[in-house]
Image: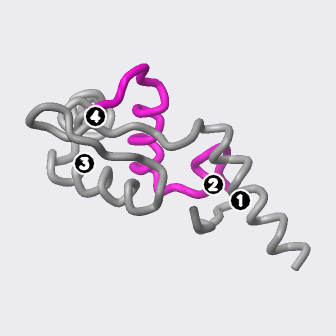
Amino acid sequence: MTPLRFDPRQSGARCWLHPFENAVMATVWKADTPLTVKRVWRTLWDTHERAYTSVATTVNRLVAKGLLTRRRSGMAFVFAATLTEQEFIDIQRGYVRAALEG
């Protein structure tokens, strides 16, 4: 995983993730099983009225960033977090600390 942009005005994972990326990750972190894009989309619909394709794009970008894994399950792909929220925060804090200590 590479360091992500840092916004000190935010808290938790939101310091490093776009608000919608954070919402997707929060949904995946709360799930006890891997989720399909459709399940993420339905879960987020009440608070984030986004097109299904926008959710799919965001999920795939999180895979590219190394935060989610993708595997085939039947006819669909399911996605799971590669690390817990606290592990993610600790890793990113380490990058910030290393940059400041330079």
Mark 3 packing: few (<14 Cα in 10 Å), some, or many (20+)?
many
Residue 71 position within the rendered picture, expressed as x and y whole percent measured from the top left: 28, 42
Q: Position of residue 72 (x, y in %)?
A: 21, 40
Q: Tag 1 or tag 3, which sits nearer the N-term? A: 1
Please say if the residues under marks 2 and 4 sit with CB atoms less than 8 Å apart. Answer: no
Q: CA distance from mark 2 to mark 4?
A: 22 Å
Residue that badge 2 annotates: 15
In the image: residue 79, left or right of residue 72: right
Between 47 and 42, the one lying in front of the other is: 42
Q: How is the image coloured?
A: one colour
Q: Are marks 3 and 4 in contact (CB under 8 Å)?
A: yes
Image quadrant holding the N terminus, namely: bottom right
Q: Which residue type does callout 4 highlight?
A: Val
- Among the two numbered marks 3 and 2 on one chain, the one whose residue lies closer to the N terminus: 2
| Left or right of 57 in this view: 96 | right
Neighbour tally class for label 2: few under 14, some 14-19, many 20 plus, Cα within 10 Å:
some
The residue labelled by disc 4 is 40
> Given contact means CB atoms under 8 Å apart, are the residues at marks 2 and 1 in contact?
yes
Calculate the distance from the C-alpha at mark 3 to the C-alpha at mark 2: 20 Å
| Label 4 SS | helix
Q: Amino acid at mark 3?
A: Val
Judging by the rendered image, the residue that carries numbered circle 1 is 8
Q: Report the residue that reaches farthest toward the bottom.
A: 102
Q: Residue at x 21, y 46 (%)?
A: 50
Please tell me how crowded label 1 is: few (under 14), some (14-19), or many (20+) other residues with Cα within 10 Å: few
What's the distance in space between the residues labelled 3 and 4, CA to CA?
Answer: 8 Å
Start-end of magenta stretch = 9-35
Q: Amino acid at mark 2?
A: Cys
Find the distance from the CA under tag 2 to the CA under tag 1.
Answer: 6 Å
Depth-wise, is mark 4 or mark 1 nearer the camera? 4
Could you tell me how far apart the alpha carbons at marks 4 and 1 are, in whole angstroms?
A: 27 Å
